[in-house]
Image: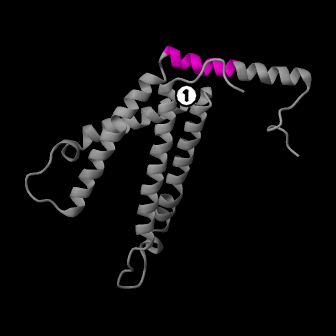
């Protein structure tokens, strides 16, 4: 069923960006997990995942669940579900808080490029901090403004009213849509 008012380009762009961001995060997670799994053994023959089992399981299972929640939210945005708009604002709020925390408590890593040579690990940490900040801060501000606009709220509310009306009519007629039927 087509909504009577089409989805705006900004909402479509936000949902597409969310899916692309989730796929990128899943790729980075896979690379990190692969490196953790294939790390060399220590002198006693123990691998990293054998020594720190809880941390390894946390790294193995939490990021894919967060990515799945992000992809589900993006699909809900495509379908103009009201819960997806609220979910997107929650994601944006968390990203904004994370970015502001990074600016407030790690200013050296985000704004200052050291003049002297630093270790490889410090350079990588600084690269991750800067890329995290440049990616999430503007997107989180954009989403918070976008999903609070009256025109965007109207799109989601109108779709919810149409969906509720169709469900009420089906309950009155005693009919069930094809995809909702369970055999």
Query: What is the residue that sits farthest to the right in this orientation?
Result: 174
Image location (x, y in percent) of residue 10? 47, 26
Q: Which of 107 and 7 is in front in this view?
A: 7
From the image, tell me which residue sits under label 1: 85
Question: Is 71 situated above or below 45?
Answer: above
* Quarter of the picture holding the N terminus: top right
What is the x, y in percent for residue 96? 37, 34
Q: In this view, does 5 lie to the left or right of 109?
A: right
As drawn, 23 above or below 93: below
Q: For residue 104, which quarter of the picture?
A: top left
Query: Helix, strand, or loop for circle 1?
Result: helix
> How many numbered marks does the figure carry?
1
Determine the residue positioned at 53% across, 53% down.
64
Front-most of 157 and 53?
Answer: 157
Q: Which of 50 and 16 is in front in this view?
A: 16
Which portion, as a residue range, is magenta? 150-161
Using the image, determine if residue 106 lies above or below residue 47.
above
Asked whether 153 falls inside the magenta stretch, the response is yes
Instruction: Identify the residue at horizontal 19%, vertical 42% (top origin).
Output: 111
- Residue 69 magenta-highlighted: no
Q: Give the colour scheme shown.
A: one colour
Residue drawn at point x = 39 percent, y = 74 percent: 39
Provide residue 118's location: percent of width, then percent of height. 14, 59
| Quarter residue 123 falls in | bottom left
Name of the residue lying farthest toward the bottom: 44
Q: In this view, does 45 lie above or below 172?
A: below
Chief SS of the magenta region = helix
Q: How crowded is mark 1: few (under 14 residues within 10 Å), some or many (20 or more)?
A: many
Q: Residue at x 23, y 44 (%)?
A: 110
């Amino acid at each position: 069923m087509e909504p009577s008012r089409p989805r705006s380009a900004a909402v479509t762009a936000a949902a597409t960006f969310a899916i692309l961001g989730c796929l990128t995060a899943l790729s980075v997670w896979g690379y990190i997990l692969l490196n953790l799994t294939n790390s060399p053994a220590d002198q006693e023959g123990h691998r990293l995942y054998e020594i720190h089992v809880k941390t390894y399981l946390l790294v193995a299972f939490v990021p894919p669940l967060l990515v799945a929640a992000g992809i589900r939210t993006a699909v809900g945005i495509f379908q103009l579900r009201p819960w997806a708009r609220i979910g997107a604002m929650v994601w944006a709020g968390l990203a904004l808080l994370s970015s502001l925390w990074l600016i407030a408590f790690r200013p050296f890593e985000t704004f200052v490029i050291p003049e002297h040579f630093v270790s490889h690990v410090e350079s990588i940490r600084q690269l991750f901090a800067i890329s995290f900040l440049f990616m999430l801060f503007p997107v989180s501000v954009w989403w918070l403004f976008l999903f609070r606009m009256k025109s965007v709220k109207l799109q989601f509310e109108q779709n919810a009213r149409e969906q509720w009306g169709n469900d009420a009519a089906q309950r009155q007629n005693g009919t069930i849509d094809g995809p909702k039927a369970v055999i």
